[in-house]
Image: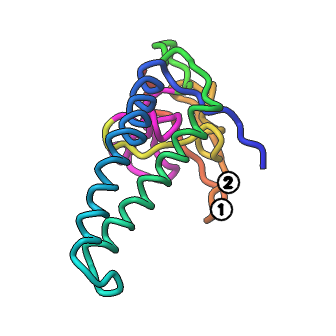
Amino acid sequence: MSESPTKLTQETHDRLSAELEDLTTRGRIDIAGHIETARALGDLSENGDYHAAKDAQGKMESRIRQLQALLKTAVIVEGASDSGEVQEGSTVTLRYEGDDDEDTQDFFVGSIEERQGGLPVASPTAPLGAALMGKSEGDTVEYKSPGGMLKVQIVKVSA
C-alpha cells in the first residue's frame, strides 16, 4: 500500500510535531504511572482501573504511530490563497442540485489534520474534494457518491 504524502501547512506540521513529542515523552510517563498505580490495587483480572489504563495506552500508542507515519511523508505547503479557486485549505460553500438557494453546506477542503473548526472535510483524494479542486465560484461539479452521481454548485470559495 503506497502512501501519498499529506500536505500540511507549517503551522499544522509544528502542532502535530509538538503533539507527537508530548505523547512520546510526558504521555508515556503518565500512562506508565497510571498502569503502575492500578497494578498495585491487586487482582488484574477484575481491576477496572488497570484495564482502563491499558486501553488508554493502546489508544495513545495508536495515535503516536499515526502521527509518525503522517509526519514522515508530510509535505509543507503554503496556506490557501484568495484566488477564488478551490485549493487545499479552502473553505467552500456548496448547494446541492435541487436544494433551495438558502440551503447550503460549508466544507473544508484538505487534510483532516488541517481542519478549521467543526467543518466537515472534503479530502482532495475523495470524490467530492477531487471534483472541487481548481474550480471557482459559480461552477457546478458532478461527483460519484455511494448513493449515485451528485451535482453541486460552488456558491462561495474562501481561504
Q: Quadrant of residue 117?
A: top left
Measured in 3D between alpha carbons, the distance from the residue under mark 1 to the one under mark 2, in whole angstroms, is 6 Å
Q: Which residue is mark 2?
A: 144
Please tell me which residue lies in front, 144 or 72.
72
Please tell me which residue lies in front, 87 or 140.
87
Residue 93: x percent and y percent? 42, 36
Magenta range is: 89-116
Q: Is residue 87 magenta?
A: no
Q: Residues within 10 Å of mark 1 (few under 14, many from 20)?
A: few
> Residue drawn 58% across and 28% down?
7
Q: Quadrant of residue 106?
A: top left
Q: Which residue is mark 1?
A: 148
Q: Residues within 10 Å of mark 2 (few under 14, many from 20)?
A: few
- For the image, the number of numbered tags is 2
Q: Of helix, strand and loop, which one carries label 1? A: strand
Q: Is residue 145 above or below residue 79?
A: below
Q: Is residue 105 above or below residue 32?
A: above
Q: Are marks 1 and 2 in contact (CB under 8 Å)?
A: yes
Kind of residue at disc 1 = Gly
> Residue drawn 49% across and 21% down?
9
Q: Of helix, strand and loop, which one carries label 2? A: strand
Kind of residue at disc 2 = Lys
> Residue drawn 24% across and 71% down?
40
Judging from the image, the colouring scheme is: rainbow
Q: Is residue 1 above or below residue 47?
A: above
